[in-house]
Amino acid sequence: MPGRLRVCATPIGNLEDITARVLRALREADLIAAEDTRRALTLLNHYGIKTPLVSHHEHNARESAARIAERIADGAVVALVTDAGMPCVSDPGFELIRAARELGADIEVCPGASALTAALAVSGIPAGRFVFDGFPPARGAERGRMFRSYLSERRAALLFEAPHRLARTLAELADTLGERRAAVCRELTKIHETVHEGTLVSLAEYFARNEPRGEIVLVIEGAGEESGPDGWSELTPAEHAALYMSRGASRGEAAKLVARDRGVPKREIYRQLLEDTDNEGE
């Protein structure tokens, strides 16, 4: 019979944020597959755990998953950990989980600390529903499309961001979303934990003057029921769409947003925009 894979959450900063179940799983495992063996070793040394470590990261995920799966096939119990938090959230753990599942091995999850739920809890942003988009693209059209999607996204949005890119990201989000509220959660659970809450505009101004350090989770409030541009009810559909397009939305994106604001089918807005375009050409 194949062995077992245990997917283990590790602390996101404070080493005390680990469960008794995870500690037992790490001690009982025959092998620990770690995204960064050096960081994992810090945790293991803190708790006096001597289980052998192997590397499993994004640059060797497919090859290492195959090797580790062979050990599981031979009956080994393997614990999977990431740098911090829950494996498989913005890291390559899914390769190993797929390989173990193909073997028919038991897969057990040992939950624990998560930067996402910690940031949501401390942000002060309503988040009964949320969407997680990982790290935004550093540049290019996809970056703009992601940010514009938040114009109509009524769920809270969570992003990871690098410190040296935070000010630019906040500025671009402010240009797109205006005075939407947000929270910058930095170094959660660590000595220098800070949470800055305000509008995207005020946060962009603050971090343009104060470059942050450490790991960052950005929480953005979802769009409200009346989230269209100010005074849109006095505009024609074409003028309403033009406001969105002035923020970088394509015609199709603008039509979708106008339809949402006005509570009408998108095809009706498309029809009116096409009629206005035809009239301009006459």
Image (cartoon, helix red, strand yellow):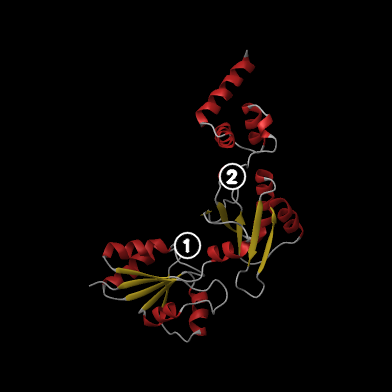
Element type where label 1 sits in the image = loop
| Numbered badge on residue 140 | 2
Distance from Cα at disc 1 to Cα at disc 2: 23 Å
Amino acid type shown at disc 2 = Gly
Residue 92 place in picture, x, y as percent: 44, 62
| Numbered badge on residue 197 | none
At label 2, counting other C-alpha atoms closer than 10 Å, the crowd grade (few under 14, some 14-19, many 20 or more) is few
Q: Do residues under tags 1 and 2 come within 8 Å of each other at their CB atoms?
A: no
Give whichever of 180, 137 is nearer the camera: 180
Element type where label 2 sits in the image = loop
Q: Answer with mark 1 or mark 2, whichever residue precedes in sequence.
A: 1
Residue 276 place in picture, x, y as percent: 61, 20
Residue 246 place in picture, x, y as percent: 67, 35
Q: Which residue is mark 1?
A: 91
Is 94 rendered above or below residue 245?
Answer: below
The residue under the point 52% across, 26% down is 268
Quadrant of the image containing the C terminus: top right
Give whichever of 86, 163 is nearer the camera: 86
Residue furthest to the left: 1
At label 1, counting other C-alpha atoms closer than 10 Å, the crowd grade (few under 14, some 14-19, many 20 or more) is some
Residue furthest to the right: 209
Quadrant of the image containing the N terminus: bottom left
Q: Is residue 161 left or right of residue 83?
A: right
Residue 105 place in picture, x, y as percent: 28, 68
